[in-house]
Image (cartoon, rainbow, N blue to C red):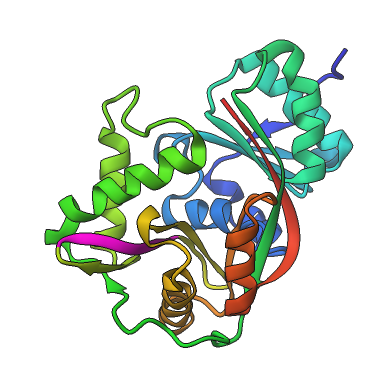
Amino acid sequence: MLRTSASRVLDDSDRDEVLALLDSDPVANVFVSSRVRAVGLNPARLGGQMWGFGPRGGLASLCYAGANMVPVNAGPEAVHAFADRARKQGRRCSSIVGPVDAVSLLWERLEPYWGSARAIRWAQPVMATSQQPAVPADPLVRRVRPEEFDILLPACVAMFTEEVGVSPNLGDGGALYRARVAELIRIGRSYARIEDGRVVFKAEIGAVTPQACQIQGVWVAPELRGRGYAAGGMAAVVEAALACFAPVVSLYVNDFNQPARAVYRKVGFREVDTFMSVLF
C-alpha cells in the first residue's frame, strides 16, 4: 500500500524556490529547468503539473508530470508521495525518465496500477563536457534553415522511430512532433550536414539553461554510419553549443549503444550520472 501523499501542485509563486532546487544539479535537471525558465509553473503553459514535496510545506523534491514524468532530487519518501499522486491521477505521460534510483522506485510503485511498459531502458549514462571537442569539427555541419524543414523532417522521424520504437506520427498524425522540429529550427537549435537534398548527420539542442544544455536526436544516415560523420558532427554541435548556449553540454545515451558511447567519449564527453527511462 502506498503511503498518503504529502506532495502538492506548485504554481508561479514557487518559481524561485523551484529554480534554486533545479540549479543544484543543472546537468541532470536541464530538461525540467529549461521548461520552467521558458514558461513558468502554470500548468496550462507548462504542459503539465509540477509537484513539490518537502517537510512542513518546504520544497526538497520535485516531479514534473507532463508528457514525460521526471522526478527531481527525489528520495524514497518523495517517490512514495509522487507515486501516490500519479496512481490517483492515472497515467497521462508517455514516459518516466530521470535518475535511475528514483525512476526505478517510482516504477516499482506504479507498475501494479499502470500495467506493463512498452520498453524499459534500465541504464542510460548521462554524459557531459565543458571543453572544446577533442576531434576536429565537421565544417559542413551548420544550423538548419527554415526552408529545409521538409528535408530534415524525415531524418527526425527516422531517428525518433529507431530510438523510441514507435513513430512520432502516431496519435495526432505527427502534428506536435512537426511543430517541435520546426520550432527548434526557428530558434537556431537544429544542426545538420545536408548534401544534395539529404541529411547526412543531424542533432538538436533540445534544452537550454544558463548553466547547461542538452543535445538530443543525434542521427547519421544508416548507409553512412561508421565513416566518421558522427564524431565530426558532434564536435561541431558541441562547439556551437559552448559558444552560443551554455558552458556545459550534456546528453544521455542507452548503455547498450556502444558505438554512440564511443563517439561521445572520443569527442570529449565523460559519464557523470545514470538515467533510466520507462516508455509507454
Name the image quarter holding the C terminus: top right
- Decide if residue 143 is in sight here: yes
In the displayed structure, would residue 81 be above or below residue 26? above
In the displayed structure, would residue 140 be above or below residue 62? below
Give the residues in magenta: 197-205
In screen coordinates, is 111 left or right of 119?
right
In the displayed structure, would residue 109 be above or below residue 132? above
Instruction: Identify the residue shown where x is 67% and y is 16%.
Output: 116
- How far across and down, in percent of the image, does residue 22 sit? 66, 58
Instruction: Identify the residue shown where x is 49% and y is 74%.
Output: 231
- Total marks drawn? 0
Viewer-proximal residue among 25 and 203 = 203
Question: How would you classify the magenta stretch by its main secondary structure?
Answer: strand
- Based on the picture, tell me whether residue 204 belongs to the magenta stretch: yes
Instruction: Identify the residue shown where x is 29% and y is 79%.
Output: 140
Viewer-proximal residue among 53 and 211 = 211
Viewer-proximal residue among 232 and 173 = 232
- How far across and down, in percent of the image, does residue 124 sit? 69, 50
- How far across and down, in percent of the image, does residue 49 sit? 55, 34
- How far across and down, in percent of the image, does residue 236 sit? 41, 79
